[in-house]
Image: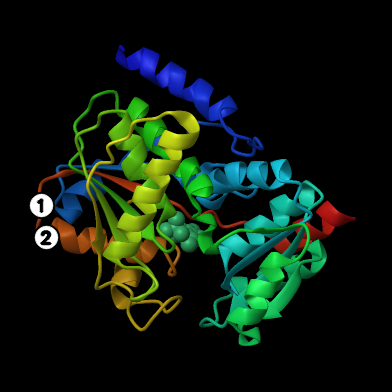
Amino acid sequence: MSGSAFFRDFRALALSGLPRVGLCRPLPTPVESFPELAEVLGLAELRIKRDDRTHPELGGNKVRKLEYVLGDALEKGAKTLVTAGGVGSNHALATAWYGRTLGLDTVAVLAPQPFNPSIPKYLEAHRQLGTTLVGLGLGPPALAKLRRLAGAYNVPAGGSSPVGTFGYVCAGVELAEQLNDAPVDAVVVPAGSGGTAAGMAIGLGLAGVDTRVLAVATVPWPLMTQGRLRGLTTRTAAFCRDRLGLDSRPVPVALVTGHVGKGYGHATDGGTTAADLFRLHAAPQLDPVYTAKAAAGLMHLARGPLALRRVVFVHTKDWWPGIAERAARLTA
Ligand SMILES: Cc1ncc(COP(=O)(O)O)c(C=O)c1O
């Protein structure tokens, strides 16, 4: 099959092969080149895949996964989405938001995390959306019970079930088409629940790109480990084979550790330095929880194995300005 036939057929499969709710727009998200920043970092080339722009109002990486997660939930007749995350979780809020637009209730089990200015706005947005918020102190047995409630659909933290991760398989194929055979030595992504990295590795592999995915951990061991990342990649590849007949050979995917700092949600000096450097060179604004840590990992790798290499950095964070007010308007 010629390259363009593969991309056309994959697009058709992505649109109709699985239950899906069309949320991302417009696609493809842009890939932009940052030659000055590349030079400063010591890379031959730096391109940024702008997945902060998956949606004009509520973009970022979550929306790609939710297209398939919510499609699956609706097909299974779900009434309530049950999910988990930190109190400032982009995932929990995006789930509640897009769930509400489809008439689904959300129960979010939230764990403490260090304060950042988004947290009060996110909690107010949840209040407006009618999310049932549950403290993590409830404990795993109660969480399991919530998930078994009639009409409940379990959305794992980060939306990274195989069905959600398929959203990033699509992103990997999309990126491959945009690369148009230009060589790339590594694709660097932040890793929380791992779906972004695992999906990218499968999608790039399906499209025959010769590269690797480097996933910079933003959560501490054992929440994310090389074994977990590999397990999610294997389960998602099996899902792609069984449900869609896709024979995938994921590109190698490696977890990059050492950039989490004191823990999930704690800003790091390396992240702050990376965010400043991006700002100085007119690259997109990074957040301290995910993308700045991934960029700190990139800076570090650029002084070692990625020196003078060609890199794509996947930017996953949209800022959702006025989110609480917009949630109020959505439900008015
Ligand atoms: C902005 C942002 N970037 C990256 C991630 C990590 O992505 P993943 O959970 O797919 O590893 C998350 C969520 O966990 C996120 O909210």
Q: Which residue was labeled with disc 2? A: 303
Disc 1, SS: loop
Taking the image as shown, residue 39 lies to the left or right of residue 235, namely left
Mark 2 and mark 1 residues within 8 Å of each other at the beta carbon: yes
* Dot 1 beta carbon under 8 Å from ligand 1: no
Q: Distance between the Cα atoms at labels 2 and 1?
A: 5 Å
Amino acid type assigned to the residue bearing label 2 in the image: Arg
- 182 over 306 or under it: above or below: above
Graded by Cα atoms within 10 Å as few (under 14), some (14 to 19) or many (20 or more), the crowding at tag 2 reads few
Taking the image as shown, residue 92 lies to the left or right of residue 209, namely right
Q: Nearer the viewer, residue 137 or 260?
A: 137
- Quadrant housing residue 217: bottom left
Furthest residue to the right? 332
Q: Which residue was labeled with disc 1? A: 307
Which residue occupies 30% across, 12% down?
A: 2
Q: Position of residue 123 (x, y in %)?
A: 70, 73
Q: Position of residue 71 (x, y in %)?
A: 66, 41
Amino acid type assigned to the residue bearing label 1 in the image: Ala
Graded by Cα atoms within 10 Å as few (under 14), some (14 to 19) or many (20 or more), the crowding at tag 1 reads some
Taking the image as shown, residue 186 lies to the left or right of residue 65, namely left
Furthest residue to the bottom? 137
**By what rule are the colours in the image chosen?**
rainbow
- Which numbered tag is attached to residue 32? none
Q: Is residue 63 visible?
A: yes
Which residue occupies 45% across, 18% down?
A: 9
- Quadrant housing residue 200: top left
Disc 2, SS: loop
Q: Position of residue 248 (x, y in %)?
A: 32, 34
